[in-house]
Structure formats: structure tokens, C-alpha cells
Amino acid sequence: MKLGIDIGSTTIKLVLISETNEVIYKSYERHHSKINEKLFACLNMVKRKYSDIGPIAVSITGSAGMGLADRLGIGFVQEVFATKVATSTLMPHTDTVIELGGEDAKILFLSNGLEVRMNGTCAGGTGAFIDQIATLLETTPEEMNVLAKSAEKTYSIASRCGVFAKSDIQPLLNQGAKKEDLSASIYQSVVNQTIIGLAQGRRITGEILYLGGPLTFMSELRKRFDTTLHLTGTCPENSLYYVAIGAAICADTMTDIDQLIDKVASYKSKENFEKIEPLFKNQEEYRSFLERHAKSDVTIHQESNYDGSVHIGIDAGSTTIKVVAINEAEDIIFSRYQTNGGNPIPPIKAILEEFYDINPHANILSAAVTGYGEDMIKNAFQVDFGLVETVAHYTAAKKFNPDVDFIIDIGGQDMKCFRIVDGAIDDIFLNEACSSGCGSFLQTFANILGYSSEEYGKLGLFADAPVDLGSRCTVFMNSSVKQAQKDGASVENISAGLSISVVKNAIYKLIRVSSASELGQNIVVQGGTFLNDAVLRSFEKEIGGDVIRPNIAGIMGAYGVALYGKNKGLLCSSILRPEALKQFTHTISYTNCNLCANHCALTINTFDGVRKFVAGNRCDRPTTPNRNHQNNLNLCAYKRTLLEGYMNKMVPSPKGKIGIPLVLNMYELLPFWTTFFNELGFEVVTSGFSDGETYLSGQDSIPSDTVCFPAKLVHGHIEKLLTKEVDAIFYPCMTYNINEKRGHNHYNCPVVAYYPETVANNIDSIKNVQYIYDYIGLHRPKDFVGKIQVILSRYFADISKKDIQNATDRAFAERELFLAKTREKGAEMIRIARENNQKIIVLAGRPYHLDPKVNHGIDQLMSSYQVAIVTEDSICHLVKEKYHANVLNQWTYHARLYDAAKYITTQRDMQLVQLVSFGCGVDAITTDEVKAILREGNKIYTGLKIDEITNLGATKIRIRSLIAAIEQEEVLGWSE
Amino acid sequence: MERIEFTREMKKDYTILVPNMLPIHFGMISAVFANEGYHFEILHNDSSAVVEAGLRYVHNDTCYPALLVIGQFLDALNSGKYDVNKTALLITQTGGGCRASNYIHLLRKALVKSGYGQVPVISLNLSGLEKNSGFQFTLPLIRKTISIIGYGDMLMLLKNQVKPYEVKKGATDQLVKQWQTRLCEDFKGNKGLSLSQMKVNFKEIVQSFSEVEMQKSEKTKVGIVGEIYVKYSSLGNNNLEDFLLSQNCEYMIPGLMAFVLFMIDTRLEDVKLYGGNKLKSAVINVLFQYIAKIEKMFIHAIESNGSFLAPSPYVHMKSLVDGVVGHGNKMGEGWFLPAEMLELCEQGFENIVCTQPFGCLPNHIVGKGTIRPIKERFPKANITAIDYDPGASRVNQENRIKLMLAIAKEQNMATVTIQVEDKPKKKSPALISVASLL
């Protein structure tokens, strides 16, 4: 008999097979990271059942089994390989295997050339990912499957990794999307992730086998795969055990069961992990720490029958709701903190009702709301004021230390940090696309290990040797924790290590200071996560100083907003009273906005049958029907209109039809190339702006899942062009950009420069058309003519040098014209904005950030705040002195950014917001540099990271905080 | 920010710290520079403090090599081993369109931030990007450096072919060390650096390695390619070479010389593609031809001995990428990366680890992006792309490599059974996919 042991990230599977590969015995257990103990127990089960088993062959497999196998002296079989062996033995006709595990996803192509793929280090797991989302939806993975059955629609949810998906789901939940639909959407996102992350351009066809936990337990997930792949896959018997079976088939270490059990029992893992100092040396140290923090308290007396004046503050956060009521002395007389269960309306209503029950005679003077759900709550319950979160938190922090100069707030889902200079919020750090997990991240880990998050945090307080888990994106943490477990780190040491890593992540990754002393002198820490003493202690140790943690750290937003309402001096609040609450109704309907290419999924909430609140929109078009009321000072929109002008230029009796994908640098060169080819007598068609279909239609040929989103979109654009019956697709490689003489050189980034090669190598159907992707240099206009002639002569007959010279001249002139129009319009918008006293924001980035899918409508969103939006290329030429960068200034697009940033430091009424594509390596350099320029000029830096993610919640906070900060500056400026 | 120049004064008594990338090469290079009056010290610090310092002072989204190199410098300065007022740092600057050309600026920023603003940073480049009065990369020095690259490549190549099979453990490393010592002695007397002396030495080196007692056994042949730092540096790739040895593999890492040729050639290609100064091209071509001559000697020395596998000539590698990527693709490793993979496939090293820093921009295109066309040409090509990054766990990386090796073993078994039947000739071009024949 042969024994296969599969130790995965969350479970241990044991399989005993006969010589003919029949499964005799199998077991499936969660190990909660206590691998040794669990394995010992599992093996004893085998022994009890088969006491006379005799010598057996054993092997170990699984992502967590590698080190263990080595140290037990047992053969190790790589787990994907094990799957392959088992499949070839049990289901030999299989073409493709899709296997999803706790944290791994794998595809095996067995026929037509063996290929096996595992998910990369970045793609957050699958089983664990579904678990996380289930927690978020307050349901179980099993229930999710049931819910998904009655789904009516699916939302587009970022499939790249768990953190991204979470940020997509949260706002949907808050907008009242149904759990049924969300469950189905999650499954769909797993399918998309598998295709894009693993298939990488290879079509999944033929006989498909579904293996692993999630695909075994979730019928709806399988159905999603079937529908998307247009086939019917099989989930075979023992689908959970294929890896273990494969290991058993390969087993070659002979032993007997007693010997094996002895080995496991006597096995002590060496503690060879990187260690950090313990958080507390002893109880004494902990006690004095607690005493010190007890000083930062606000008086709380939860009163009943309070009949004085009160101010209500509501913080409708992304996952939780906090409500406080304060009296005139600013003491808290009532506070509640709970999760929002996906829809903040019912819990807030219940909390208000409870408040009215307890304090029927309280005199409510004001009510104010902050947080993600601010707009909706304000509308639903007729709350008096709404306030941006950052200001709410600052207001509360000031209560504890009027000189506060740095606030760090780590909540369940988000981290917010802000620096305060001269009483105004000066610098804001919000976690965006990446490293989202904070409080909820610790919670998820606690849950996986079978603890409550409170218990789990406490475990780490007296850990003797906390594990150094690094400080990178939390998605990576799973594998770091796995590694630590394997290296024999105790649960206590891992718990402490996680707390420390949360802190390090915040300080070094999010805020980006190199030493903690740069943070500030008077630091207030808050947010639910800091109620965890281990996190608080780690923070103090890391910065080497004391900070203030208010006793109400978890409800600071609500407290701050209550203070804000109080300071407004209202005499009576309009918030719904008990009678009105009794009648309160809330109905939700869904629709898609069709006013632009974004097709936002709108959720229409109707309160009491009359008050409507629309959520999910990016801009104010669906909510402001009267176009005259809309803000038209948006240069991005103008540039898009200009580009549209080049999309459908008619040419009489054309020589041929050339397709140009509107991607990356083509966003800038479209006027040039369209004119060039038109002049040569060709008709030019483009793929147009990206829309909802673009990404999906091209996703299965993307070879690198970590490339930036604008590059990923290229695939969809090419697919679109291929449907347009073009004679050739023109998308040249361009190492160099046009030389604008702003920096040391004029490069394109590697991705922009060479993506046409990736198209040629990875999109099969490109072979059906002439694909012109030669290397072309517009930086040497004189040489260009001769060079392009040689290139074109390879594809088309009879194009004379004279014609090319003429076309080139016209093309360069057209490019100049495009630029001139942009600058002129920009100048005009700036003038009008100044006349109307509107703020001006330079939305800076790269030309392709104009694409409505790339920027997710951020320009329109910003525009709805009544600010004028201009672009960096419309102002960079205005800079007086040439900017000398502290970095190598050799990319054309970057040079514009630096010049634009430099210019706005000379303009009082201008601010700059930088758009950064997630995964853009060169922007690691530009963001720091632009920030340095702005800081030097006393301007606030605001960077927005964008990806396929469509959550604009963080963007809204940033924009509103920026506007609030400017306003405050203006007030201060005037009072001088 | 003012750049601190490395002055003539400083040359006298400053220690110049150099990050380690290729241990064999760099050791010898420092000997040559010592002759010219520079005090080089190659850094070997590789504790977690290196990564920690890097994370602290370098933007975390910057590529991993920058983070490690800068971290290594800062950790060294922090160590107390060096008088920070008598220490300079040396870093290469390539000047291409990849973000890597910004390392030096990121390093300077990090130095200022960590309180070492006084430490001068020397840029080692061939593009005339930055100049220092106390440090001149003169033509003779360039020539000597090139010679050392030749020697380094030779020792590395032979070591990699002998070590997995050595009978006496440590014999190969011992021999490498012997040669290093002997060559460094020679260099001190300005010997061993001319073409004719190299020719003699090359021959002798190859001979000495062929005399190491070897026990040939079945091993998985693995090629290592990728971003230059991560590919070569054990600090960058979590001791990839040792791991492969422990997994019963023979690995091949293409040498540095062909990469230098590639770097020079990109300038010639630029002129071809976009036009430019023909005279400049001619000058560059002289350098190119000089190195090509060494390459020829190099290959000849190995082939005439007959015991080892010689690398393919640069021109051949260049022709391999026709139809895969253009020769204008020059940022990072550019077209040279798929060329290396194709050459490895040709040489029978179809199992390839393609190493890159997480999110490496050029490698989206020339690494991961070319695996498909390479597999079309060599269906047995078994390429795994591994991302390196401070957060990526080693277990994860090794697990992936193990998967690649498991497939390699299986394919290999298939090959062996067929080989018995039709005995393919030694060095058959591009073993046809056996798997597809089955």
C-alpha cells in the first residue's frame, strides 16, 4: 500500500491507495497551522484503522510540505506534478485540469504540449480569497454558493487579487447591492482571474477536470467556469484528493506507520526564522504602558433618560458603523460600534431608535455624518451636516492634543494618515489599490487560525521572539506566514510579527518615511486596529517614542463629526425623529447609466418613497439632468473630443485601410499618424476609447499579469481592430519619444516602447492581418522620412519619398496643432475659472490616462466638485526656469510632469493631482520627485493610484480632503 | 541636490565600496583597479539588515536590485567598519530607458536621507554620464576590465560545468580560487591582460578544468537567465545556484561578455534604425570588434579542448531572435534575454529559470512576453518565470522551480527512451519535441 500526504496551506489530506491505485482510505482536515500535531493525529487514525498495515511507501506533497518532507527524510513530490500524475492515472483523457486550492490556483494543460501553471506571488489566493469575501458578506462560503444560485446580475469586480476585489465589493455593499448578485460576481472574478493569471494566452478547451476544495464544494463556481469557457467540465470522485493520490502513486520512501508516527512525534522544527525583539519584556512593562494610555481618555457615561442637549455623530465606514452622542461638555453619553452587514441603513436606523428609546427627552441640536456612506446616510435620515473623513478625524484628535501634527488611523479596511501643518491638513496618505488589508487582515488571519481577533492580538503581547514578516503588501503576507510556520514559529510569535508588520507597512510603505522621527512630534493614533495593544506597542517601538491613543480610538470619526456639528451652533437638528423613523421605508432599484462609456451600475435608493439617492455614479451627469448646471471646465473631456475628431476621417477612394489601436502612446500620436496616413491616401480606423468589453475581450492573451492596466488593455484594442476589416494594423515600437528638450533624454518607458512586440508574440489572430510594428524614431524627423519609406515599401507598393516628405510635414504640423489647441483651451479654462473664482486642478499623468477606462472617470468625478481641470501638457511649457531634477530626467512624459509641478508652485490657485498606474515601475521615481517639487513649493501632493479597480471611494476622500485643505488655507491666508 | 565629486585628493585614501554581483569577476576587477591606486572593497554583507535598510530608504515600488544594492551600501556604512568620511561608493550606470538608470540618483537620495550626504558616489559608465576628477575610466582601464570579464566568464562557465560532477568535493571551487589568485598576481605586474597572453591563459585554464576528476551522472540541465543583477547575485536570487545544485542539476548562466557586446551593439543598432552619426558608429565598432576578438579566442579555447560546451558567438545569438523581437528592443536586457533563452534551448538547456525583479518593466515584454514564441520554436522549452522581491517568499519560489524540475525529469525520461532508438548526434540542432512525437 502507498500513502500520500498532502499538506496544503490550510488543510492536511491523507490518502492510502492499493497497488492498483484504488483509494482505500482518505482524510481531509484543517490544520490551523499546527501541522505537526495534526499530522500526528491523522497518522494515528490510519494506524488505528489499519493496525496490520506493514511496510508502506510514503511521500509528502503540498505547499506547506516541502520543508517537513526534507526534515522527516521522506520524498517530496511537487504538488502540481502530483496532480498531473493522478490525472494521467485516473482520468487519462483529460485535456486541462483546473485546480483551486486554499491559496493556490493551478492550470495543467495535458494535451498538445504539456504546460503547467501556478498562480504568481501576487495573485491573492482563491479559497482563502473566497473565505475573505464570505466574511465580508457576513456569510459562509457554503451559503455563498446557495446565494449565487439566485443571482440576477453580475457586477464587474477586479479579479487581480483579493485586496482589489474587496475594494470593489465594499462600495457595492454600501450602495445596497444584493448579496446574491455579489456572490455570483465573486465567482465570476475567480474565473476571470484564473483565465488571465494562469491560462496566459492559452485557450482552455477539451475535457476539463475541476479539482480542489472550492471547485468541489461550490457548484455555482463550476457553473461559472462552464459558462465562461463554453464547455462542461467534470468534478470527479475524490476531487479533493488528487494531489494526495498523485503523491501516493509517486511514493518511494519505504517505512512503516509506527516509524513514521515516531518521526513526526519526535520532530521538532528548528526555529530558524528572523526574529525581532519582544513587544514587552514582562508584565510590569505592560502595566505601565496601560497606565500611560489610560490618561488619554474622554469621559464616557452611557446615560439613560438624558434630557439635556446632544449632538449626534455618525461615521458610516466601509465595514463598520459608529454612532456617538455627546453633551455640551463634549462627554460621550451614548456610543455604538458595529459592522454594517453590507448595508448601513438598517443598523443606523436601529441604533437611532435605540437612542430615542433610552433618551426620549434628549434635545438633539445637531447631527452630522462622515465616512464612505456619508451622502446616502445624510439623505436617508435627514442629517444636518456631512463632513469629509479626514477633517472629522482631525477635529477629534485636536480634542486630545491641540498641537497634534500627525494622525494615523488604521481601521478595518483602510488606513488614513495625515500630517497637519499650521492647523491645516497638509499631506494625506490613504491606502489604495495595494496593501489594503489592515484591521480586517489581522482578523482574517485570526479566523483562519481559529481565534477571535482580540484573542489573537493578545497572544502576541508576550511572544518571546516575534517573527520578522517584512513590511510589504499584505497579500504577500500569506506566504510569509506559511514560511514562518514551516520554520517552526509559534502562533504567539506569528501574531506579534503580524502586528509589527501592519505597523511597518503603514510607516514605510504607505507614509513612506525613512525614519519614524519624520512623522511628527505629537502623534495621535486611532482606528479600531490600534485598540489592539500589540499593534499600539509595535508602533511606539518602531517610532521610538510615545503616542496618544484615545480610549475612543475606534470611534474617533464619529466623535469628531459630532464635535463639528456642535461647533456649527444649530438650534435644532432636522434628523428623523422616532415618529418618522417608524414610517421610514427604503427601496432599492438598479439600473445602468448610459450617458457615457463607463456605464456605471447605478443603485437608486428611495427613502420614504420620495427622497432619491443615486449611488455608483462617477460623475454628476445622471444626477444633474440639466446640462447647464454641469461644470464644463474639463480639459480631459476636451482632449477626448479632439481625439474623436481623428477617429473617423474620411478619405476619398482610399488606397487601403489602416487600423490604429488607441492605446498607450497612441493617445498622443493619433493626430500625427492619422494625418500621416491620410495624406498618403489611406483611410485610418481606430479602436476608439476603451469600454467595458475591451479588457475582457483581450484578457486571455496577456502574458504578464503584473504589467500595468493600460498595457493590458492593448489586447482588447487589437481584438477590436481585427473585427474592422483593416488591411494592416499599425502599432510601431518606439524606444524614443518625440524630443521636447525638457530633460537629458526623451525615452518612452519600456512597456510603451515595446508593447507592440508583446502583441505580435501573444495574440494569435494578429497573424491574419499585416501587422506593422517596426522600430520607428520620431525624435529624428529628418531621418524619419527615409526610414519610414523603407519600412512602408515592405508592405505597400508605390509610395514616393516626396509623398512621404509631404505627409510627414503635415503630420508634424497636425501634432503641433493638437498641442496648440490643448494649450489654448487650457489657458481659456484657467481664465474662466479665475473669473468665477473656481479652483484649478492639474490632473497630471500620461497621455493615455485620458482613456475613460484607464482613469475610471476620475476627471468627471473631480469636475463634479466644481473645480476646473486642466492637464499637465497644457501648462508644462509655461514654466519659467528649466527644472533640474534630482533624478535622471530622461522620459518625455516625466519631464512634462516635473515642469508642470514646478509651474503650479508659482500659481496660488492651482493644485496638482497625479494619476499613477498601479505597477508602473517608473512612477516609483516620478511620484517621489513630483512630491518633492510640490513640497518645496508648499503645495499639497495628491497621488491617485489607478488600476482595473473601479472603486472611487478613496479618490473622493482625497479630492474632498484636498479641497477642504485648500479652503482652510484660503481662510488662513485671508486672516493674515 | 549637489553632487559630491570624487576628487583626486580622495583617491589617495578613500575606500571605494562596490556591491557584489559576480563574485569571480568582481574580485579580479578590484585587483586591476588596485594597480591604478584605487582601494576597492567588494561588499559581502547579506543579512536581513540589507533588505531592511533598502526598504527604509528606497521607494518600495522601485525594483528589487536597487533596493538591495542601496541597502547593501547603507548597511555597510552603518556597520562601523568604514570611516564614513573616507569612503566612496561605486555603482554602474547604464543610461538606458529602463528605470535602472536611476539607481545612482536613488542612492544619493537615500544617502542624504540617512545622514551620509558627504559620501561621494562614483558612476561607472561608458556613456560619459557623470565625471569625477579622481576616478577616470580610461581606455586602458576599460581594456583591462574587458579582459577580466573574459577571464571571469571563463572561470564561471567551466566551474558550472565541472562542479556538479566533481568527485572530490570542493575541488572546482579550489581551482577557481587558484586561478583567481594567480591571475591577480599577474595583473599586479600588468601581465595577463593582452590578447596574446589571454590566449595562452585561456587554453591553460580550460586544460586545468578538464583535469578535475569528474563522475558523469544524470542531472537536470537548467539555464538561468533574467535581469542582470537578480540573475547573477545570490543576494538577489536567494542563492538560486546553490538550490539548483542541491536539486541535482547542472546549471548554465550565460556570461557577461556577450551582454557587454549587446550593450555596445545597441548603439550601432540605434544608428541603423533611426539614423545618426556614422563616425561615432565607427568608433564604437572598434570597441565591439575588439571584444568580439576575445570572444572568438574564448570559444576557440573551449572547443579545441573538446571537454566542455562553449557558448555561441554573439552574432549567432543575435540571429536567433529574428521573428521573436526586434534588435531595436534594448531597454534592460532587451532582445538579448530571449536570445539567451533560445541559445540555451539550442544547447540542450531547455529548462530555464527566468529571474526578474517583481514588476520588472522590460521583462513583461522580453521575458514573460516571449515565452510563447520560444515554446513554438522549442516545444520542449520548460521555462518558469520567477519574481524576486523582498516580500516574495523563498518557499514559493523554490516550489515553482521544483515544479519546473519535475516536468523536466518527466520530459527527460521520454527523451532517453527515444534516444536509445535513434541516437541523435551530439549537438543536434534544437532537439525536436519528443513529447509531441509521443
Image: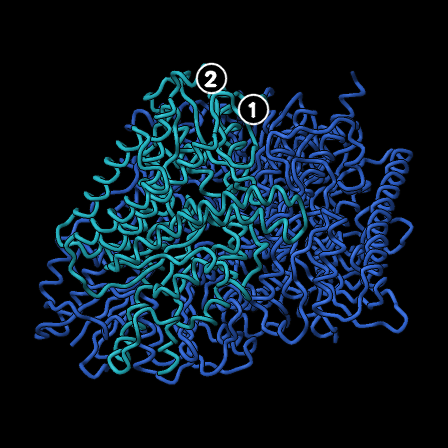
Chain colours: A blue, B cyan
Between residues A571 and A240, which one lies in front from this camera angle?
A240
Which residue is at a point 63% across and 71% down the rendered structure image? A766
Q: Secondary structure at mark 2?
A: helix
Q: Quadrant of the C terminus of chain A?
A: top right
Looking at the figure, which quarter contains the N terminus of chain A? bottom left
Along the horizontal axis of the image, is B190 left or right of A372? left
Q: Amino acid at mark 1?
A: Phe
Left of A140 or right of it: where is A830? right
Q: Is residue A56 left or right of residue A286?
A: left
| In the image: residue A67, left or right of residue A411 | left
The three-letter code of the residue at mark 2 reads: Arg
Q: CA distance from mark 1 to mark 2?
A: 57 Å
Q: Are marks 1 and 2 in contact (CB under 8 Å)?
A: no
Q: Residue furthest top?
A: B9
Subunit of mark 1?
Answer: A
Which residue has dot 2 on it? Answer: B8
* Location of residue B13 in the rendering, given as x and y in whole percent from the top left corner: 38, 16
> In the displayed structure, would residue A510 be above or below residue A604?
above
| Viewer-closest of B205 and A890 | B205
As helix, strand or loop, the secondary structure at mark 1 comes to helix
Residue plotted at (28% across, 70% down): A244
Return the chain for callout 2. Answer: B
1 vs 2, front mark: 2
Question: In terms of depth relative to the viewer, which is nearer, B85 or A640?
Answer: B85
Q: Which mark is residue A400?
A: 1
Q: Residues within 10 Å of mark 2 (few under 14, many from 20)?
A: few
Q: Is residue A688 above or below residue A727?
A: above
Percent position of residue A413, x then y: 53, 46
